[in-house]
Amino acid sequence: MERRLDFLPFGRPDFSDAEIDAVARILRSGWIGTGAEVQAFERELADYVGAAHVVALDSCTSALHLSLAALGVGPGDEVICPSLTWCSSANAALYLGADVAFCDVDPNTLCLSPETIAPKLSPRTKAVVAVHFGGLAIDLAPLRDMLPDRVLLIEDAAHALAARYPDGTSVGSAGRPTCFSFYANKNLSTADGGAVAVADARMAETLRCLQQHGQSADAWKRYTESKKLLITHVMQLGYKANYTDLHAAIGRVQLRRLSELQQRRREVAACYARRLSGEDLGLRWQQNVFEESHALHLAVVLLPLERLAASRDEIVVELRQRNIGATIHYVPLHVMPFYEQEFGPCELPTTEDVAQRIMTLPISSSMTVQDAEYVCDHLIDVLQQAAR
Ligand SMILES: Cc1ncc(COP(=O)(O)O)c(C=O)c1O
């Protein structure tokens, strides 16, 4: 079989001349920090997701951390999050001195559910971090209904910008704090960056204060009101997590291009659906991955290990030999040395089964349908060679 010469990464940013021009415009403007461009990006993103307020930050990690801080999570509290996620979903609580209780996932959605959360609820539960894994927007209404009123719900939507809930509304529009990522490989990338969408104006104000050392006025206010002497006070212990105009300029262009970028992801997914979703291969796909409501941040597939003489790791290595950047999302957190030492062993049967067989195939708006066909040709070949 013919092999491509260049490596196809699982995710790749997609920048046009418009992003490059936008960065040049900011560089020439004399103001590169947090200013008018960040404010414009926040407004445009709020319109896009249908949120009353958006606060842009330096990362989704900060968005999760500051959201939990603003909600008063602290020592003695417990925060529930899935183990099948990136470490930020859990670390946000740990930074605040709270404990984490890892929960299992549903085998079809690969996300938490009322059933997987129920055994983890305790009198100490203060919040649940719901991760929209891979870009599948889970229905949070049943979850909200089963949680006691005192338990806060926040959304880790790092993968889920452009995703829609089952009722057709956009992720970010539900009012509760919803955290997005603009990291290098995300559907909308600004190299790094994040944001919280939220309905509550007071919470948005608190986030703005926390992101700049808990100060009463930021550098942009001092600059734009430079004829006055603005004395800045630290009002509470804050952090350094502000977003910059340089990043926001890229974000504004990416947001304008988002439907075009999503369309390209859908073309790749359509090729995978056509070639790789038949019974004969035995691959199991995440629920709704081929629906329009899915953000398609990740194309994850569960391998039929029972039919194969090779492990998932061997399949991934073979694809990599063929210049296909297959990878793994995720090694579950509860089996990682740090979390195991902190919280002791815990059993999450579905997560552990999924973790043996899950594999991420390349998907990005930089990919062509030919790239996707190449992935399909080789994955089919690898699976046939590995068949028992
Ligand atoms: C599920 C999830 N949550 C949070 C984050 C953190 O995002 P960031 O890198 O913007 O801090 C990531 C990063 O990939 C993620 O995958």
Image: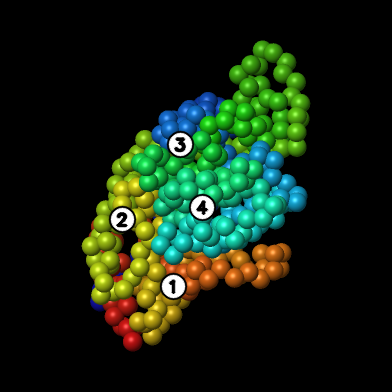
Q: Which mark is residue 357?
A: 1
Q: Amino acid at mark 3?
A: Ser
Kindly state the secondary structure of the residue where label 1 is placed: helix
What is the distance, in whole Å, between disc 1 and disc 3 at their CAs? Answer: 34 Å
Which residue is more in the foreground, 310 or 340? 340
Which residue is more in the foreground, 220 or 261? 261
Residue in view at x 75 percent, y 49 percent: 75
Kindly state the secondary structure of the residue where label 3 is placed: loop
Pointer 4 residue: 131
Which residue is more in the foreground, 166 or 333? 166
Q: Amino acid at mark 2?
A: Phe
Return the residue found at the far top: 227
Ligand 1 within 8 angstroms of badge 4 C-beta: yes
Residue 61 can be seen in this image? no
Q: Is residue 251 above or below residue 31?
A: below
Residue 304 can be seen in this image? yes
